[in-house]
Amino acid sequence: MDETVDPSSTPAHPAAHGIARTWARALLTFEPADHGHAEAAARAAYRAARRPEPSEFIWCPSPWAALDLVRSLIQDGQVPLVNAVRRTVLNQALSAARSPLVDRVSDTERLSAFGEFHYHFERKGFYGEQRYDGVDGRYDLMERPYRCPPVLPSERLALRPVLHAVHQTYRHVLSPAWSAIDRATSADYTLQPAWYWSDEHGLVDQNDEARAVVRYSTPDLNDRFFDPAWCFYPDLMVLAAIDTYRRVFDTDPGSAWQGCRDVALTSGPWWPFPETAVMSERPALLTLDEQDRLHADDGPAIQWPDGHHVWAHDGVLISPPRSGSATSGA
């Protein structure tokens, strides 16, 4: 039923390259963050989530500094609004963009797509996210399926080249950098409430349309239980999906997603709290090889304004060939 197709072998929609370039560039740029535009966009994101605007914005010079602040706020009893301000709003936008396509197909087409959709997840091992309860109680998504509408063949054809391109950039640039960050925050589950998908250790959220759509359209995206970049900052994949519906299918995701979109295009990762928005600067240095993989021969491949840095070759995290830690900026 479902087969793995190389996205490069499938003709892409004329707009796909531009969409992919937009969201890949959000990962690749080391232009300084635009504080004014990012803060205005964050306020818009709070309003879209029907939350009071933050009373302060704290700009951190690196993701390390940002996560230190996030940890401190959580330990002080503040509750992150990641689910309300980012995840829920983007899910609603994606659903609004998809619904006209699903509504106009016949029951037969919808049923056929539903079967292929769930067969894919079962065969790929995503059903139930292979969660275990205790020792041997695996939850199977054939018993607990996603409740969102299945992805139609036309949707997947349009999404695959875009999400594949963004994911490749994500895999070769964002993931190595955040793997380095994870070495400094390893086993610190204090930060789990600030994850974008905070149910990563529980049962699959059957209503999370964005995760279902992204994972179905990128079959090479394996389950990322402990990848900190995936847990904290998958926004670009979801934003690219919404943008694909808007530009390829000419559907309307509404205006609520625009705040999250504009923050992603003007700053580094961010975390909303009830009164405080934690913002992070972009890297001051980022070098790639000819295949757009994080790479440098004789120095850090990526470095932030506070000196934290990461060494990488061919998109793979390495330790620096001198004293000091790749995660400490020493």
Image: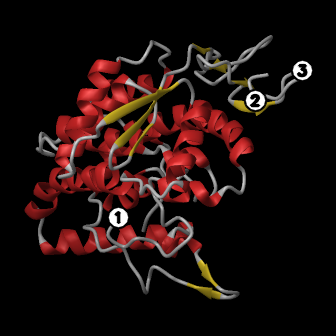
Left or right? Give the position of 129 relative to 323: left
Residue holding disc 3: 321
The residue at 65%/24% (across/down) is: 294
Residue 208 at x, y = what percent?
A: 34, 64
Left or right? Give the position of 83 relative to 318: left
What crowding class fits label 3: few (fewer than 14 Cα within 10 Å), some (14-19), or many (20 or more)? few
Residue 88 at x, y = what percent?
A: 29, 56
Quarter holding residue 181: top right
User: Which of the two marks, 1 or 2, is nearer to us in this view?
Assistant: 2
Residue holding disc 1: 208
What crowding class fits label 1: few (fewer than 14 Cα within 10 Å), some (14-19), or many (20 or more)? some
- Mark 2 or 3, nearer chain start: 3
Residue holding disc 2: 328
- Mark 3 or 1, nearer chain start: 1
Residue type at the position of mark 2: Ser
- Mark 1 or 2, nearer chain start: 1
Report whether residue 224 is seen.
no
What crowding class fits label 2: few (fewer than 14 Cα within 10 Å), some (14-19), or many (20 or more)? some
- Closer to the camera, 39 or 149? 39
Residue type at the position of mark 1: Asp
Placement of the N terminus among the 4 image quadrants? bottom left
Q: Under tag 1, what secondary structure?
A: loop
Residue type at the position of mark 3: Pro
Q: Tell me, yes or no, whether the two marked residues, 2 and 3, touch with CB atoms within 8 Å.
A: no
Quarter holding residue 182: top right
Placement of the C terminus among the 4 image quadrants? top right
Residue farthest along the front direction in this orientation:
76
User: In this rendering, is residue 42 above or below 233?
Assistant: above
User: In this rendering, is residue 321 above or below 243?
Assistant: above
The residue at 33%/38% (across/down) is: 240
